[in-house]
Image (cartoon, grey):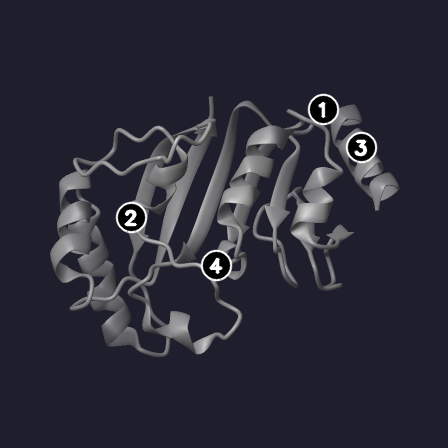
Amino acid sequence: MQNIINKLLADKVNSNEKIILELGCGNHKKINNSIGIDAIDYPGVDVIGDIFEVLRLIPDSTIDEVHSFHFVEHISDLTGLISELARVVKKNGIVGFTAPHFSNPYFYSDPTHKTFFGLYTFCYYSDCSLFSRKVPTYNMDIKFNLESVDLIFKTDKVFLIRAIFKHVIGKLFNFSSYTRELYEDSFCFIFPCYEIHAILKKK
């Protein structure tokens, strides 16, 4: 595995490309030219292995961006994952997480889901000035700034009327940080949110 990782990183450096990781990429990557990592040998996966084992083989401060789409909810050690990402990501590098919101009723159907996510989850792991409500960081060594958190409202495309309604709801509640907080405090179990999208930037 180490030789594969070394070659992938060297190829990116030699071609003067950004080094982008996509965690849990599954059978198709969403980020063009990213290095796809997954525990399952799907077509298009570049590195097959446990995410923690793979990250431990990556040198410090070598990665420009990391993205994951519906992956981190399958990880039980979110603190450990963010710590490893803080080690491998360069200064000013970006980490993007897309994960189910805790109000998403489909979250509970998947027995492999382990971790819940809400508006404030990544505030516990970063310097966050986005919201009025403040949360503790439990004396962790904070390596990220939280740049943004968006609430994503959508449903299966077969439910066209619902999809249109949720698009409108999304526009309303993502209008400002205040409306996002208002949503999670007062409306999240009336109008369930499908997912959150958070962007963190390495200090």
| Residue 11: numbered disc | 3
Which residue is found at the position 37% from the left and 54% from the top? 117
Which residue in the protein does label 2 denote?
119
Q: Which amino acid does label 3 sit on?
A: Asp
| Residue 16: numbered disc | 1
Q: In this view, does 155 lie above or below 13?
A: below
Q: Do the residues labelled 1 and 3 touch (CB within 8 Å)?
A: no
Q: Distance between the residues labelled 1 and 2?
A: 36 Å
Mark closer to the chain start, 4 or 2: 4
* Rendered location of residue 4, percent (x, y): 84, 43
Q: How far apart are marks 1 and 4 (CA)?
A: 33 Å
Which residue in the protein does label 4 denote?
73
Q: Which secondary structure, mark 4? A: helix
Q: Distance between the residues labelled 1 and 3?
A: 8 Å
| Residue 120: numbered disc | none
Q: Is residue 1 left or right of residue 84?
A: right
Q: What residue type is labelled 1?
A: Asn
- Which mark lies nearer to you, 2 or 3? 2
Q: Which secondary structure, mark 1? A: loop
Q: Which secondary structure, mark 2? A: loop
Q: Do the residues labelled 1 and 2 touch (CB within 8 Å)?
A: no
Which residue is found at the position 76% from the left and 33% from the top? 9
Mark closer to the chain start, 1 or 4: 1
Mark closer to the chain start, 1 or 2: 1
Mark closer to the chain start, 3 or 4: 3
Q: In this view, does 137 lie above or below 115?
A: above
